[in-house]
Image (cartoon, grey):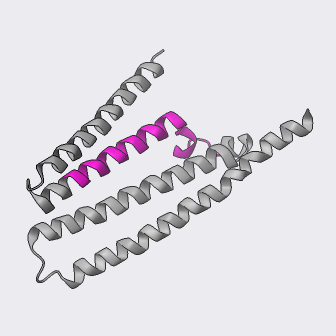
Amino acid sequence: MRRFNLMLNGSRLMMFPFYVCILVCVALLMVKFAMQLYVLSRDIIEIDYLDLITGVLTLVDFVLVAQMLILVALCGYVQFIKTPEQRAALGDNWLHKINFASLKLIVINSLVTIAGIEVLKAFLDDGIGNETEMKWSVIVFLAFSTAALIYAITERLADHK
């Protein structure tokens, strides 16, 4: 039984490569961010206002996705990789205070924000030219927003019990 407990406890280290891969994805996003910033900077003189706004919103998308990935990697690392003694040594650090419920809420809110930015970009790019696509984009955004709201309410109610 002791071996089994050690094996289960050691299996948490299997998550480590996933967190490393998440950080690699952040590096890849950084490359695409730099490329987008270069294109915007290069064309700043002849680019029109709506294209500039769309480009800036794309950069904001990159930042939000990168922040979400880093937060998931950090919180997962603290929860899964570190031992309980190492977690206790964090003290009042914000990483120690984030649990999976609050992490899920942060991720859901990030997804809602990203979806909202994508709807805004689609509207700025296409206007109301393709009405069916815009309706579906708004419906998906509202679905994400509703899910986030419901999740936040249920978490709040669960915390008060």
Q: What stretch is highlighted in magenta?
A: 90-119
- The answer to whether 63 appears left or right of 161 in the picture is left
- The answer to whether 71 appears left or right of 18 in the picture is left
Check the picture and name the quadrant holding the N terminus: top right
Quick check: 48 above or below 126? below
Q: Is residue 103 magenta?
A: yes
Residue at horizontal 54%, vertical 38%? 97
- The answer to whether 74 appears left or right of 115 in the picture is right
Residue 66: x percent and y percent? 43, 60
Main SS, magenta residues: helix
Residue at horizontal 14%, vertical 55%? 123
Q: Does the magenta stretch include residue 116?
A: yes
Q: Nearer the viewer, residue 76 or 93?
A: 76
Q: Which of 125 and 97 is in front in this view?
A: 125
Residue 9: x percent and y percent? 78, 42
Residue 68: x percent and y percent? 44, 52
Residue 92: x percent and y percent? 56, 41
Residue at horizontal 46%, vertical 20%? 158
Quadrant housing residue 125:
bottom left
